[in-house]
Image (spheres, rainbow, N blue to C red):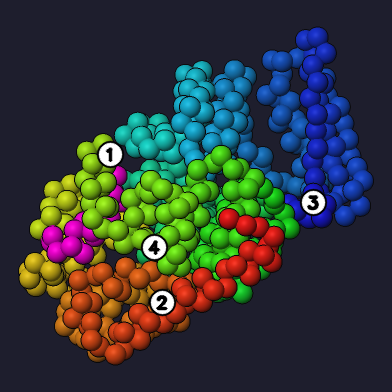
């Protein structure tokens, strides 16, 4: 596959930069994507102080070659300061390195932030510099520090797509619905802003919109075909809509274009999302084999083995299991001991609070579950934008805890709010249907609750046992044949995957 095919473009622009004494020699050529031949080339010799104006000159030449007679207005440079421009480029370089990996390298991200701070000091009128500083701070998790630079960028250039996109990220981090408007405006200002397209699609989806969302993700991917994360974002949406065939087509594209651990881990995740956990394990092993010292791959494999009910292998892989793995193995007493200690060390970890509260519920400690959620501010009895998975899980755990305590007024109020909330998806996998069923059970609408439970059988993904068997809202169905049939269905799927796994690993040529 040629580079133009990989990028989905008709032409490529290639260039090189060499220094000869105090002269910078820049060579640029336009390559025809179909023939691979150069259709235009030029060499420019300039001094360092002229480098910024040279960039604009090269851009104008390229536009005239590809769009002769075009009246398109070229964008202004991000800054008129050569030193600020250099700081911006260095900041972008380090930030992209951080965003290209699964684990955030705080050291590199702080270097990017330092360069962006330098850029705004050198050019206080550069909206892009302020916007990128705010974006990096948000990625670091410092929402308060991001506030001043993003609103400074907004005051300088409110009609810059990247500024509106960063504003959307800021509002999203604050849990404010204005994020939707900002992302929508960012897309309107630049329909080729892939980041804005993807985040606009996401806020639409969490508000319950299905129509057109996958197309926005597809558009972002077509613009940025070399970004592995774009494949992952589209794949997760398609998996949520139970579009298994399209997910498999996307996996084939990833295999064709990418290689290495990041690609293998993404494919492993997508295979888990469509229920083929045996193949997810095989891809996870491939990733581990490339990076045998990376404990993340081992922990992921342990979670996959736990998801098919092979707790023995999961424990062998991870002898000191994380709280998440203890949760998947339903080792609730051990989880409580570990999570209570971790709550002291990491009091702001939302997921730990939710998992601890869930474990309290399963052991009948409903008051402790309420305490650990409410005393730390999670969750409210009504949810606000955004709605992360951890927030939703905290919400249902609190509802189950109040239900277990016998506080029907509070539990049924939370259940009714969720059932009446319009932001639900009809094509989602087991997750939403199960939580709807739980709410209906709390409301005493048992026939409807059982109908919803049966709808989970359509999910390609394998629902975990703890959702059905350890949630207080379903305990009254312990002898109900329809409920038991759902439980047995997913147990049988896990058993089938365990039986199929050895053959799958042999087919992939890997071993644990």
* SS class, disc 1: loop
Mark with earlier residue (2, 4): 4
Q: Is residue 231 visible?
A: no
Whether residue 357 is in magenta: the answer is yes
Residue under pointer 3: 4
Say whether marks 4 and 1 touch (CB < 8 Å). Answer: no
* Span of residues in magenta: 347-366
* SS class, disc 3: helix
In the rendered image, the vertical position of residue 28 relative to residue 435, given as above or below: above
Q: Residues within 10 Å of mark 4 (few under 14, many from 20)?
A: some
In the rendered image, the vertical position of residue 186 relative to residue 466, given as above or below: above
Q: Is residue 265 left or right of residue 417?
A: right
Q: Nearer the viewer, mark 2 or mark 3?
A: 2
Location of the C terminus by quadrant is: bottom right
Residue at the spot x=80%, y=33% of the render?
15
Question: Distance from label 1 to label 3 (Cα)?
Answer: 47 Å
Rendering coords of residue 319 (x, y %): 41, 48
In the rendered image, the vertical position of residue 218 relative to residue 92, given as above or below: below
* SS class, disc 2: helix
In the rendered image, the vertical position of residue 206 relative to residue 419, given as above or below: above
Q: Residues within 10 Å of mark 1 (few under 14, many from 20)?
A: few
Q: Nearer the viewer, residue 501 or 157?
A: 501
Question: Distance from label 4 to label 3 (Cα)?
Answer: 35 Å
Say whether marks 2 and 4 touch (CB < 8 Å). Answer: no
Q: Nearer the viewer, mark 2 or mark 1?
A: 2
* Residue 200, numbered circle: none
Q: Is residue 287 left or right of residue 62?
A: left
């Amino acid at each position: 596959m040629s580079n133009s095919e990989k990028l989905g473009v008709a032409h490529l622009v290639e260039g090189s930069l060499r220094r000869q004494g105090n002269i910078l020699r820049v060579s640029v050529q336009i390559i025809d994507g179909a023939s691979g031949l150069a259709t235009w080339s030029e060499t420019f010799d300039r001094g360092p102080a002229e480098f910024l104006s040279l960039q604009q000159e090269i851009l104008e030449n390229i536009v005239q070659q590809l769009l002769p007679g075009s009246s398109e207005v070229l964008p202004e440079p991000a800054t008129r300061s050569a030193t600020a421009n250099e700081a911006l480029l260095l900041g972008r370089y380090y930030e992209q390195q951080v965003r290209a990996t699964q684990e955030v390298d705080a050291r590199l991200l702080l270097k990017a932030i330092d360069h962006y701070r330098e850029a705004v000091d050198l050019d206080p009128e550069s909206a892009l510099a302020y916007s990128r500083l705010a974006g990096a701070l948000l990625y670091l998790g410092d929402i308060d520090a991001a506030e001043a630079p993003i609103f400074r960028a907004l005051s300088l250039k409110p009609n810059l797509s990247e500024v509106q996109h960063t504003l959307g990220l800021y509002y999203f981090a604050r849990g404010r619905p204005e994020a939707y408007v900002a992302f929508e405006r960012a897309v309107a200002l630049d329909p080729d802003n892939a980041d804005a397209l993807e985040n606009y699609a996401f806020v639409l989806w969490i508000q319950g919109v299905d129509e057109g969302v996958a197309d926005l993700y597809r558009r972002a991917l077509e613009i940025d075909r070399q970004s592995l994360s774009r494949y992952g974002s589209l794949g997760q949406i398609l998996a949520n809509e139970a579009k298994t065939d399209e997910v498999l087509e996307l996996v084939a594209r990833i295999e064709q274009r990418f290689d290495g651990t990041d690609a293998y881990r993404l494919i492993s995740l997508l295979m888990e999302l469509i229920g083929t956990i045996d193949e997810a394990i095989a891809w996870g092993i491939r990733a581990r084999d490339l990076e045998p010292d990376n404990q993340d791959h081992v922990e992921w494999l342990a979670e996959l083995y736990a998801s098919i009910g092979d707790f023995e292998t999961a424990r062998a892989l991870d002898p000191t299991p994380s709280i998440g793995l203890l949760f998947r193995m339903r080792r609730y007493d051990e989880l409580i001991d570990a999570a209570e200690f971790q709550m002291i060390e990491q009091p702001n970890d939302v997921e730990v609070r939710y998992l601890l509260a869930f474990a309290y519920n399963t052991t009948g400690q409903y008051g402790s579950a309420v305490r650990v959620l409410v005393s730390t501010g999670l969750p409210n009895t009504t949810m606000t934008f955004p709605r992360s998975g951890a927030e939703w899980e905290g919400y249902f755990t609190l509802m189950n805890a109040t239900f277990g305590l016998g506080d029907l007024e509070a539990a049924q109020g939370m259940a009714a709010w969720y059932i009446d909330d319009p932001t639900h998806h009809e094509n989602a996998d087991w997750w939403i249907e199960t939580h709807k069923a739980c709410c209906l059970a709390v409301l005493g609408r048992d026939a409807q609750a059982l109908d919803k439970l049966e709808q989970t059988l359509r999910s390609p993904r394998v629902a975990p046992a703890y959702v059905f068997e350890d949630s207080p809202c379903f305990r009254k169905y312990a002898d109900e044949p329809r409920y038991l049939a759902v439980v047995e269905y997913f147990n049988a799927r896990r058993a089938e995957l365990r039986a199929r796994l050895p053959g799958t690993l042999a087919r992939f040529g890997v071993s644990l």
